[in-house]
């Protein structure tokens, strides 16, 4: 099974990406346990975290049934470094054709950040697996609905930024595939038990918002 097959299966199960900005390798086991045991299968450690490649390698080994990777990936060289650490997800705040192309070449999952339809189509043409609508605070569920009317059918579209358990339903009803969840789930120093509580709230909110 390819990484794309695994990603699609994870999205069908629970299309929420845990964005663990600021995570340290020392925190990774307990925080990862709290999130994975709550049902998350998509874990992202932004590269502007302390020793992010170490955390990625550790969680990749600890959670073989999850997809682990990096966020804030800005260069093709960083893609190669994430790949060497065992990461399979490459998430960016922007669309960079070289980053997307290198990610696709290595068989990894590419989720670039886009803010306009032009960027969205360019990212897909470059080989993106799906699209990160970022920042979601600058958009709206109406934007999701309008984009999905013109994007290729089945394109994963995941708003990131300002997503909480209380506002997921509106985005979901507009057609959002899933979400990236950042500081509402984890921030540096947050105890693992508190992360677990919030992870479970997000899972419950998603399950409650899924249309029959």
Image (spheres, helix red, strand yellow):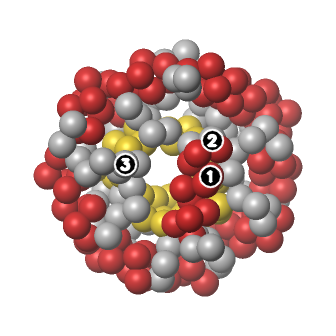
Q: Secondary structure at mark 2?
A: loop
Q: Residue at x 64, y 26 (%)?
A: 207
Q: Residue at x 47, y 82 (%)?
A: 106
Marking on residue 149: none
Residue furthest left in the image? 118
> Which numbered disc, 1 or 3, marks the residue closer to the eye?
3
Q: CA distance from mark 2 to mark 1?
A: 6 Å
Q: Secondary structure at mark 3?
A: loop
- Quarter the N terminus occupies: bottom right
> Which numbered disc, 3 or 2, marks the residue closer to the eye?
3
Q: Residue at x 71, y 33 (%)?
A: 199
Q: Above or below — where is 11 with respect to 181? A: below
Q: Which residue is mark 1?
A: 10
Q: Position of residue 201 (x, y in %)?
A: 70, 24
Q: Which residue is mark 3?
A: 154
Q: Above or below — where is 47 with respect to 17? A: below
Q: Residue at x 38, y 31 (%)?
A: 175
Q: Which residue is mark 2?
A: 14
Q: Above or below — where is 110 with respect to 156? A: below
Q: Position of residue 169 (x, y in %)?
A: 49, 19
- Quarter the C terminus occupies: top right
Marks 2,1: beta carbons within 8 A: yes
Position of 157 compared to 47: left or right?
left
Upstream in the sequence, badge 1 or badge 3? 1
Position of 193 compared to 19: left or right?
right
Upstream in the sequence, badge 3 or badge 2? 2
In terms of image quadrants, where is residue 74? Answer: bottom left
Q: Residues within 10 Å of mark 1 (few under 14, many from 20)?
A: some
Residue 132 can be seen in this image: no
Q: Residues within 10 Å of mark 2 (few under 14, many from 20)?
A: some
């Amino acid at each position: 099974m390819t990484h794309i097959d695994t990603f699609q299966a994870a999205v069908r199960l629970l299309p929420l990406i845990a964005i663990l900005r600021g995570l340290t390798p020392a925190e990774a086991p307990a925080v990862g346990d709290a999130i994975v045991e709550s049902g998350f299968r998509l874990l992202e450690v932004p590269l502007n975290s302390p020793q992010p490649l170490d955390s990625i390698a550790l969680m990749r080994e600890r959670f073989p049934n999850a997809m682990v990777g990096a966020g804030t990936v800005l260069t093709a060289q960083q893609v190669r470094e994430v790949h060497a650490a065992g990461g399979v997800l490459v998430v960016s705040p922007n669309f960079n054709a070289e980053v997307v192309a290198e990610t696709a070449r290595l068989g990894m999952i590419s989720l670039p950040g886009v803010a306009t339809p032009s960027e969205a189509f360019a990212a897909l043409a470059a080989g993106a697996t799906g699209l990160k609508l970022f920042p979601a605070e600058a958009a709206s569920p109406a934007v999701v609905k309008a984009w999905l009317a013109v994007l290729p059918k089945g394109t994963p579209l995941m708003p990131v930024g300002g997503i909480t358990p209380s506002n997921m339903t509106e985005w979901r009803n507009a057609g959002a595939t899933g979400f990236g969840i950042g500081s509402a789930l984890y921030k540096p120093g947050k105890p693992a038990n508190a992360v677990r509580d919030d992870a479970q709230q997000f899972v419950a909110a998603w399950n409650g918002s899924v249309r029959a």
